[in-house]
Image (cartoon, rainbow, N blue to C red):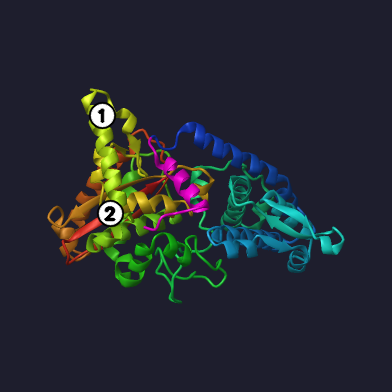
């Protein structure tokens, strides 16, 4: 992968800390959720004022919420695109008031609670002309995500109980499940290079709804600049990035087993599911294209690194010292030593290089939530009927039953039995015909 520099280098250096064991430490999560709670409580008064305004019809109030939701989603989807972010972070007050003709002050108040601020225009005599969102860090992300959660909560209530329920009190609590459920209305993870639509649950393609936000959490130009091998594989081996019936069956059945016996059910996050699906497909393709896992170092750099690591190992062993000072955690939280780092190759290189960058494009992760990721490879020799039988046949049902239990046991062990997992995304990619195997990948919050 290309070497990163400038702001990208700082981001890449900071992201691996999110994936270090132990994941989801209470102080970190509590801090993030506490900030979200404060932001949602600040947004409740203007939200109540909008929903309880007797001069507005319920449809008009919901229309204002739709406008705010679209404005925020458009910004969050363009966080990785400097040009798009600069374009959409500013809203002209005249345009806002033209779009919302009845009581626009409600929408303006909520936008301010979501991270927007009035910006004066010197050419207009110092009068505020724009609402500007930012900067693109946790300071503005927390209010934006909190307002999106509140809007989703209100709209879900209206859908379930009717518009009369809009005046009822709104809970200000924002949970990990609430954040994981946000889709940012883009219905895709990676921007497509063509105009075809992605299949439901896919990782690439155009938005599926006319009203959906245009764009993707991972822009194509961003992916080509940072992970060119992955971008090339998305074009050359598209069939491995599509989800079939077998893959969907594994995801559905595994989710059921992981939730069995839990009082607090795991939230199935669409965004995490797309990220897990992308990682599973990438790993499957990398087994066919080993060059995807190559590290971008010159022979001289590799020789120097080898020499330094050998010297450090020799000194520690000769002195009988503990080599714990040379231990570190990689991007997936695995403890590594100089010896294991030299042997690290293939799938591990792809994971440790790509996973932090890709998950860092998700606003909830950028805010500070710490994900964890685990993977399992299943071969045809272990569950032959799963690969060879028709999905309606008895052999397939028996095989998928044994497979889902095996995967659930493995993932519970890898994630930790007592780990506080609140939301998951499961991906599965199958290669039939070339060393028949399936890659099952789980991303958890």
Residue under the point 21% across and 57% down? 397
Residue most extreme to the left: 381
Which comes sooner in the sequence, label 2 or label 1?
2
Q: What span is colored magenta in the figure?
A: 1-21
Badge 2: few (under 14), some or many (20 or more) residues near its Cα, within 10 Å? few
437 shown above or below 372? below
Horizontally, is 445 left or right of 350 in the view? right
Residue most extreme to the bottom: 195
Q: Residue 218's spot in the image, x, y percent?
A: 47, 61
Looking at the image, which is closer to me, 200 or 120?
120
Horizontally, is 439 left or right of 80 in the view? left
Q: Which residue is mark 1?
A: 315
Q: Residue 347's spot in the image, x, y percent?
A: 27, 52
Residue under the point 42% across and 65% down? 224
Badge 1: few (under 14), some or many (20 or more) residues near its Cα, within 10 Å? few
User: Does the magenta stretch mainly form a helix, a strand or a loop?
Assistant: helix
Q: Secondary structure at mark 1?
A: helix
Q: Magenta includes 20?
A: yes
146 shown above or below 70? above
Q: Which mark is residue 409?
A: none
Q: Magenta includes 233?
A: no
Q: Residue 295's spot in the image, x, y percent?
A: 31, 54
Residue 218 visible in the snapshot: yes
Quadrant in the picture for residue 35: top right
Q: Which residue is mark 2?
A: 299
Q: Quadrant of the C terminus?
A: top left
CB of mark 2 within 8 Å of CB of mark 1? no
Looking at the image, which is closer to me, 187 or 281?
281
Q: How much space separates mark 2 and mark 1, taking CA atoms?
A: 24 Å
Q: Residue 67's spot in the image, x, y percent?
A: 66, 62
């Amino acid at each position: 992968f290309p070497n990163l520099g400038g702001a990208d280098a700082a981001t890449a250096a900071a992201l691996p800390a999110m994936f270090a064991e132990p994941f989801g430490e209470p102080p970190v999560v509590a801090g993030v959720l506490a900030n979200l709670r404060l932001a949602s409580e600040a947004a409740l008064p203007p939200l109540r004022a909008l929903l309880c305004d007797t001069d507005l019809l319920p449809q008009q109030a919901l229309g204002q919420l739709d406008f705010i939701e679209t404005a925020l989603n458009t910004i969050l989807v363009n966080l990785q695109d400097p040009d798009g972010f600069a374009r959409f972070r500013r809203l002209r007050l005249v345009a806002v008031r033209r779009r919302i003709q009845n009581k626009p002050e409600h929408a303006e108040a909520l936008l301010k609670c979501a991270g927007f601020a009035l910006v004066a225009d010197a050419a207009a005599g110092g009068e505020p002309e724009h609402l500007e969102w930012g900067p693109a860090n946790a300071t503005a992300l927390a209010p934006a995500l909190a307002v999106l959660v509140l809007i989703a909560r209100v709209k879900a209530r209206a859908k379930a109980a009717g518009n009369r329920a809009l005046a009822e009190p709104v809970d200000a609590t924002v949970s990990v499940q609430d954040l994981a459920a946000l889709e940012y209305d883009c219905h895709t993870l990676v921007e497509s290079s063509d105009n075809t639509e992605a299949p439901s649950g896919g990782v690439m393609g155009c938005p599926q709804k006319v009203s959906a936000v245009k764009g993707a959490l991972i822009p194509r130009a961003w992916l080509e600049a940072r992970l060119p091998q992955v971008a090339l594989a998305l074009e050359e081996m598209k069939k491995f990035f599509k989800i079939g019936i077998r893959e969907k069956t594994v995801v559905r059945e595994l989710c059921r087993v992981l939730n069995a016996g839990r009082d607090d059910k795991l939230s199935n996050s669409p965004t995490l599911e797309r990220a897990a699906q992308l990682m599973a497909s990438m790993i499957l393709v990398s087994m066919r294209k080993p060059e995807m896992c190559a590290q971008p170092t010159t022979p001289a750099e590799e020789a120097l690194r080898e020499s330094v690591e050998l010297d450090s190992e020799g000194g520690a062993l000769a002195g009988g010292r503990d080599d714990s000072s040379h231990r570190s955690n990689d991007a997936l939280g695995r403890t590594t030593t100089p010896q294991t780092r030299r042997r690290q190759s293939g799938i591990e290189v792809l994971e440790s290089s790509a996973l932090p960058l890709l998950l860092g494009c998700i606003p909830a992760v950028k805010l500070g939530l710490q994900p964890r990721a685990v993977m399992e490879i299943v071969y045809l020799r272990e569950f032959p009927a799963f690969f060879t039988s028709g999905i309606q046949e008895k052999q397939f049902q028996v095989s998928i039953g044994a497979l889902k239990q095996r995967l659930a046991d493995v993932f519970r062990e890898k994630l930790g039995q007592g780990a506080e997992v609140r939301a998951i995304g499961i991906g599965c990619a199958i290669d039939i015909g070339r060393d028949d195997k399936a890659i099952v990948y789980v991303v958890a919050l």
